[in-house]
């Protein structure tokens, strides 16, 4: 994966998620309670399928989550803005049935960081996604929340992806 440099006008970052196109086995590790000091996790498996959309200006994936509480499905739509040179990541799932506000960010030095502000249990918090440890056959994703303006982060969900095809 090549590096992203906001000052480098020749780089086309729309290929940042090319590593993710295809089929994946996914191992999830999800914190049972968020922002409560909990260290109890649930672990479960699933699958993900990702493909390009809009002639490569975006991509989407559909994911299954085989949770102990029952199967859920989700999808992410990722759109690249060539003017701001940033990605917008939109999530929806079969639990809420709504399209969430976008996480905004970019890749730099082989690591993608994406941020948003959201309401969690009535309080405004920052949220963060990180894509890292990217190889041809695996990658790591994690989600975290911050209730103190980004000074500290609680990771509440991780996914380990292993390529199927």
Image: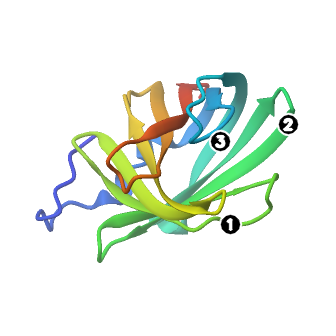
**Which quadrant of the figure contains the N terminus?**
top left
The residue at which mark 2 appears reads as 71
Q: Residue furthest left?
A: 7
- Badge 3 marks a residue whose secondary structure is strand
Residue at image x 46%, y 52%?
Answer: 147
Q: Look at the image and tell me whether residue 137 can be seen.
A: yes
> How far apart are the two marked residues, 2 and 1, measured between alpha carbons?
19 Å
Q: Nearer the viewer, residue 51 or 48?
A: 48
Q: Residue 161 sits in which quadrant?
A: top right
Residue at the spot x=61%, y=40% of the render?
34
Q: Is residue 115 above or below residue 141?
A: below
Which residue is rendered at x = 45% and y = 30% of the image? 139
**Residue sitting nearer the eye, 41 or 81:** 41
Q: Residue at x 38, y 27 (%)?
A: 135
The residue sitting at the right extreme is 70
Q: Quadrant of residue 46?
A: top right
Crowd band around label 2 with a 10 angstrom C-alpha radius: few (<14), some (14–19), many (20+) = few
Counting residues from the start of the chain, the first of labels 2 and 1 encountered is 2
> Which residue is disc 3 drawn over?
49
Q: Position of residue 78 (x, y in %)?
A: 51, 60
Whole-number angstrom distance, CA of label 3 to CA of label 2: 16 Å
Please name whichever residue, 65 or 79, is drawn nearer the observer in this view of the structure: 65
Is 144 rendered above or below residue 96? above
Instruction: Name the residue that disc number 1 marks.
Output: 99
- Position of the C terminus by quadrant: top right
From the viewer's perspective, is 52 left or right of 70? left
Q: Kindly check if marks 2 and 1 are in contact, taking CB atoms under 8 A apart as contact.
A: no
116 horizontally vs 99: left or right: left
């Amino acid at each position: 994966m090549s590096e992203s440099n906001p000052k480098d006008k020749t780089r086309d970052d729309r290929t940042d998620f090319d590593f993710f196109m295809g089929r994946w086995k996914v191992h999830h590790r999800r914190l049972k309670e968020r922002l409560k000091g909990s260290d109890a996790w649930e672990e479960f498996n699933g699958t993900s399928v990702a493909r390009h959309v809009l002639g490569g200006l975006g991509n989407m994936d559909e994911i299954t989550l085989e949770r102990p509480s029952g199967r859920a499905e989700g999808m992410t739509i990722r759109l690249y803005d060539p003017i701001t040179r940033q990605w917008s990541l939109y999530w929806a799932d079969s639990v809420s049935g709504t399209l969430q506000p976008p996480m905004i960010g970019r890749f730099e030095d082989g690591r993608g960081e994406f941020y948003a502000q959201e309401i969690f249990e009535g309080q405004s918090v920052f949220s963060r996604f990180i894509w890292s440890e990217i190889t041809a056959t695996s990658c790591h994703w994690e989600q975290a929340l911050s209730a103190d303006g980004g000074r500290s982060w609680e990771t509440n969900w991780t996914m380990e992806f292993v390529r199927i095809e």
